[in-house]
Amino acid sequence: MRYRIAASDSFDLTFPLTPEYNQLGVSVQPDGFVTLYGIGDVKVQGQTVPELTETVKQTYEKLLHDPIITIVLKDFNKPYFIADGQVGHPGKYDLRADTTLTEAIAIAGGFTEDSKHSQVVLYRRVNDQWASAELIDVKKMESDRNLREDPYLHPGDMLFVPKNRISKIKPFLPSSGVGGYVPIK
C-alpha cells in the first residue's frame, strides 16, 4: 500500500530543466492544499507520490511545455500503531515493518498481570467516519501454538487490552496483610 499525502507533510519539488520553479519544503496545509510558484493553490491531500507527480506535471503544463519534475517527500506522517490498556508501556509506536498483533503487544512491553489476553480488541480505521473493531483471543492463539490467525497491523491501528475480571475486583478482596496477627520476633 502506497503512502498517501496528508496535512503537515512536506516535499521538495524540482524542475531539472527549469530550476527557477524549484520549491523546497512545500508544506501541505491543514485543508490539503499546497501553494505552487506561478500556479497558486492545488489540492494534493490523499494522493500517492506518483499521483502527486502527475497532478503537478499537469498543472505546470499550463506554463511549461512537457515539464520534467521530481518530487521527494521530506517530512511525512510515519506509519504508527497505538497500544492501549493493560500493556507494559501504552503509547504510540512507529510501524517500521510487517508487524503482527502479538509482536505489537511485545513491543509495547507485553501483557501486564491485569490483562485479559482472551479479549484483545484491534481497532482499524475504515474511512474518515468508520472504524472496525475485531476481538482477538491471543490467549487461545498462544496456547494452541498457532499464530496463523495473528493479524498484521496497518498504519493507524489501535490495539486495546482490557482488564481481566480479577483485577476489577482485586481492590475489594481482603489482602493477607490485613488482620489481627502480629509477627513474633
Image (cartoon, grey):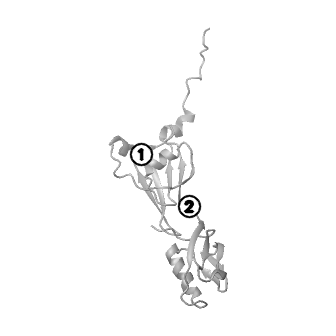
The percent position of residue 130, horizontal first and vertical second, equals 50, 67
Q: Is residue 3 left or right of residue 179?
A: left
Nearer-N-terminus badge (1/2)? 2
Total labels: the figure holds 2
Q: Determine whether, in the image, residue 153 is placed left or right of residue 69.
A: left
- Indicate the position of residue 113 as horizontal and vertical percent values: 50, 37
Q: Is residue 65 above or below residue 171?
A: below
Towards the viewer: 25 or 2: 25
- Residue at the spot of label 1: 118
Q: CA distance from mark 1 to mark 2?
A: 30 Å
Residue at the image position 50 percent from the left and 51 percent from the top: 160
| Residue, disc 2 | 78
Which amino acid type is marked by label 2?
A: Lys
Q: Is residue 129 above or below residue 39?
A: above
Residue 170 versus residue 9: which sits nearer the camera? 9
| Residue 29 in view, yes or no | no
Q: Residue at x 52, y 38 (%)?
A: 167
Residue 164: x, y in percent? 48, 41
Hey, what amino acid is under mark 1?
Ser
Identify the secondary structure beneath mark 1.
helix
Is residue 78 in view?
Answer: yes
